Amino acid sequence: MNIPDSQSLALNANFDSKDIRRFSVLGVQIAATKISSVISLMETWIAGKDCARYIILGGMHGLMESHRSSDVRRAMQTADLVVPDGMPLVWLGRLHKLSPTKRRVYGPELMREFCKITQGKYKHFLYGGNEGVAMQLAKVLTKSFGTHVVGTITPPFRPLTEIELLKDVATIHDSEADVIWVGMSTPKQDLFMHRIRPHLKPCVMLGVGAAFDFNTGLKKTAPPWIQDHGLEWAFRLITEPSRLWFRYLVLGPQFVGLASIDFIKQKISKKIFGSQQI
């Protein structure tokens, strides 16, 4: 049994977030929104029970992977929502003069706020993290917010076999979870959500990256003032140089150049043709 592509499903889904304005960055539509609006939209989708959906928390790294890979680009372009998880996207939103883009939609914060607001209202599934981290996070969320966690899976870091993937999908499906938090690296988590969506019952999946580690206290978050000034990359580079040097020292400057050219082209197009794709 093969996992089918979910592009057609995304294109036919009754997308009910038309009021959220978007701006284009390297061919991906970024929602100019905030955490409270994302939470409201998630609750609307869960109540609607029409299909499985997924939200990508986008940043510089994800967009550069999208620029370099057609598979990643397809996963981002067919997501139900791509929100600005990195400050560079917040700044680009401001350049497009989209007022809701004041703060980033930070994955660990979104998870905490959703669980804090909804308490035990929904069933949650945790997929990802290092060995034992998902179970530890389940305990933290349950103790702190009364979150109802119905299952956890820690997949291996290597690519899953078809049998392993189908087994994990079946476990998630049978849990009847309303919210699935996927804590894997980018773009692995985006490709995973895109691939498994057609096999799930109505739910909302979110790729939250290192939120599992941050919300269990296994990794230290940057101070708020560092985050708000777009310097978290430097903080994380200092704490994990061997893992993150390529992302921030190579892909970062490339993103600045490509995004700047993309923004200028959009402005020229708007001036010439009187419209802009945002």
Image (cartoon, rainbow, N blue to C red):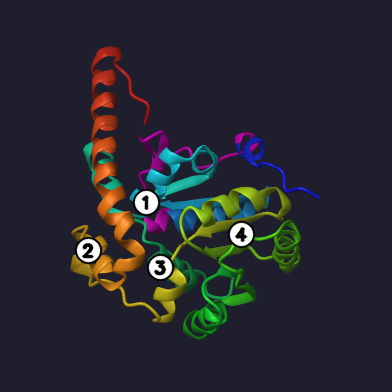
Task: Look at mark 1 in the image and give the residue it sits on.
Answer: 61
| Distance CA(mark 4)–CA(mark 2) | 30 Å
User: Is the residue under label 4 in contact with that under label 3 (CB below 8 Å)?
Assistant: no
Q: Quadrant of residue 109?
A: bottom left
Q: Quadrant of residue 24?
A: top left
Q: Secondary structure at mark 1?
A: helix
| Distance CA(mark 3)–CA(mark 4) | 25 Å
Task: Look at mark 3 in the image and give the residue it sits on.
Answer: 108
| Distance CA(mark 1)–CA(mark 4) | 20 Å
Looking at this view, is 16 or 229 the one in front? Answer: 229
Q: Write the start and end of the magenta stretch as one range.
A: 11-37
- On the image, the x and y values in percent for residue 135 come to 57, 81
In the rendered image, residue 24 lying in the magenta stretch gets the answer: yes
In the rendered image, residue 108 lying in the magenta stretch gets the answer: no
Q: Secondary structure at mark 3?
A: helix
Which one is in front in this view, the residue at disc 4 or the one at disc 2? 4
| Distance CA(mark 3)–CA(mark 1) | 17 Å
User: Is the residue under label 1 in contact with that under label 3 (CB below 8 Å)?
Assistant: no
Task: Look at mark 2 in the image and give the residue it sits on.
Answer: 234
- On the image, the x and y values in percent for residue 182 come to 54, 63
Label 1 environment density (alpha carbons within 10 Å; few <14, some 14–19, many ≥20) = some
